[in-house]
Amino acid sequence: MKVFRTVTSHIRRGLFLGLALLCACSQSFAAQPGGNEMFIATNAIQVSIPAATNGVIRLQGPWAFHEGDDPSWAGVNVDDSNWDKFTLGISASEQGIDTYAGYAWYRLRIQLQPNSKAAETQLALLVTPYSVGQLQVFANGVEVGRTRGMTDHPQEFLAGPFINQLPHPSPDGTIVLAIRAWAGGAITHGLVDRVSIGGPDHISESFVLAQARHWDEHILAGLMVSFLFLCVAVLGATLYLAQRHHVEYLWMALLCLSVMVTGTVEFIYHLALMPLGVFTVLNLWTGRLFMVATLEFILRFTGSPLRRLVRIVQLCVMLFPLLSVVHLEKTYEILSVTAEIVFCGLVAVMLFRAWRRGLTEAGVMLVPFFLGSSADSIDTILDYFAMRHVLPDSFSSHQFHFGPVQFSISILSYTIFLGSLVAVIFYRFIRVSQEEQRSSAEIEAARSVQAMLIPTQLPSNRNFMLDSAYLPANGVGGDFFQVLPLKDDSMLIVVGDVSGKGLQAAMNASTLVGALRNELSHEPATVLSHLNQVMLGASSGPIAGFATCLCARIHPNGEMIIANAGHLSPYRDGREMELAACLPLGVIPNVEYEQSTFQLKHGDRLTFVSDGVVEATDQKGELFGFERTQQVSHEPARYIAQIAQRFGQTDDITVVSLYFVPA
């Protein structure tokens, strides 16, 4: 609730920013032509304030500056003539001051004209820290204000501007300002960025403007980008719910959520609600979560075979932050940079290889994804080279502006990355939806064809009891069987399997079934010879194919004449029947198929199966095999089909069972 109240307060101030700006400008122009803030920069450490203090005066300096810490330096009678001179708003290195860490003091003596309006008015001081600097402000030896992190044990909060009510000056109109500064890391700029003095009303207006400037420079851009990533995360979750089998949408949502969480952590940090130490640790993990989610999304999106390599990189990326936690910072920095290089390279390789395979959207995403993957690294690299003076200082933490809003290269990279991500995902979703609609239409057409291939009811006969089961692997398949009663009360049974999958296999099977139903001969060998010619004609198109087939004619007296075209032999009472082997249908023309004759006994059970039973494979890669098939061959057809399916179906399963019970 505290965070919510703080955010609400900032938003309310932002709404009245324009009004405050107009008020400040109108009062300042009434005071002087130059605006509402007067700049005083002298060569001495004593600054004189005019008698008419209308508006705000910026105390740019030079200030007396000294490293170290001594509580007595807050007093009035301190000899600071030998201290360094420091002008605010300019980096320390440009003023000849080396990098330091810990405490430092700034001092400035202000001289008000006696008996003036400024000497009679209680003035206020607006102090704006730089970065994570913690400040404690003294006036004439008395503390008048401090930042949140400036305690007995200082913490590195990102301090914002704060107002200090100054006491009345000494009788001679003197106010001695002393600012105690502290930072835990190396300081190159100076921890005091701006100091302004003026009446309470004018300082309050400047404080509102300073807070607005703080939001513009540090918060608004990141907050807007985080909100956009949250919207895209919701979009990804919605697309995943619409197409559950496309897991890449779920990982896209997690990817965007990781960026949103990173932005939320930065938002809380810039509101001075989180110390730098906690922010650094959280930022380590949220950045790594982005890398893990991005790698998984690219892996799923491209269907890359580099799954094992991706898993290794993901594991290393999540373990590396532990090195920083246990204070192995140097090792962590080296491994972290290496991990980022490997991460960017792996993303680029997977997208490039997918693009070469024909996945157009992978090529479109290549450059934006590389920008998004290296967004944080770009700022780090520029800062490093600027610190080494390879690049000018202007490249260090370079900022762009869109109106009053300031944003960095990383924010720009993330925005480009997000735009390309949304465009490509929408394109992919629409394309996949269209393909699935076409596939659904093909499946519906194939199902109507399937009704021709698989009899819904088996013909009744007083001599034979028939049972069948058909379990396609992908909605429709290439297996088929027909049971045709003949005029002499005999039964013609044909079981076959067309090569291939899906609609094309089903269409070839329907061609064979149509030819079978128009077949005049009922001799198994002749039937297979005619079907061979039909299959050769069907395979003359753009897609060649063949089919295995078994044809058996069973007479009421138990005589069975059977011919085989490369199909699995049937089982008789749990034993495989020995048949002459011959080529499948559609391989070569004018094949002569050999017939075999058997005599069935009362109570014999014949079981015809397709290779989907034998080739069922479990999770360990073990086949169901001929031995198991033989062991269950005396069971009902549905039982055989279901046990093979539970074992691990990989192909269409067809089982036809005949029980011979002569009248």
Image: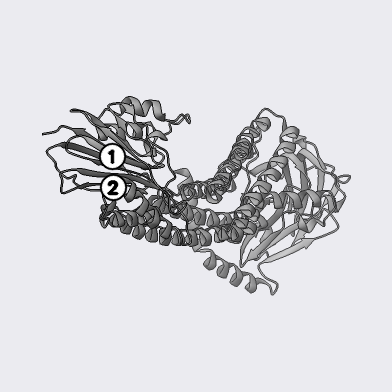
The residue identified by callout 2 is 523
Q: In this view, does 273 lie to the left or right of 152?
A: left
Work out whether residue 80 or residue 629 is closer to the camera in this orientation and state it.
629
Q: Classify residue 265 as left or right of residue 584.
A: right
Say how many tags the image has.
Answer: 2
Marking on residue 561: 1
Answer with mark 1 or mark 2, whichever residue precedes in sequence.
2
Residue 456: x, y in percent?
A: 21, 47
Residue 374 seen from this side: yes
Looking at the rendered structure, the secondary structure element under dot 1 is strand
Horizontal and vertical percent position of residue 644: 35, 33
Left or right: residue 184 versus residue 638 is right
Q: Is residue 561 above or below residue 391?
A: above
Q: What residue type is labelled 2?
A: Glu
Q: Counting other residues with Cα less than 10 Å from the Cα at mark 1, is it few (<14), some (14-19), or many (20 or more)? A: some
Figure coloring = one colour
| Numbered tag placed on residue 545 in the rendering | none
Q: In this view, does 269 lie to the left or right of 592?
A: right
The x and y percentages for residue 161 are 63, 52
Q: Which residue is more in the foreground, 236 or 186?
A: 236
**Mark 2 burial class by Cα count in 10 Å: few <14, some 14-19, many 20+:** some
Q: What residue type is labelled 1?
A: Ile
Quadrant of the image containing the N terminus: top left
Q: Nearer the viewer, residue 540 or 252?
A: 540
Q: Where is residue 254 in the image (x, y as percent from the top left)?
A: 50, 46
- Name the residue nearer the viewer: 609 or 88: 609
The vertical placement of 34 against 615, above or below, is: below
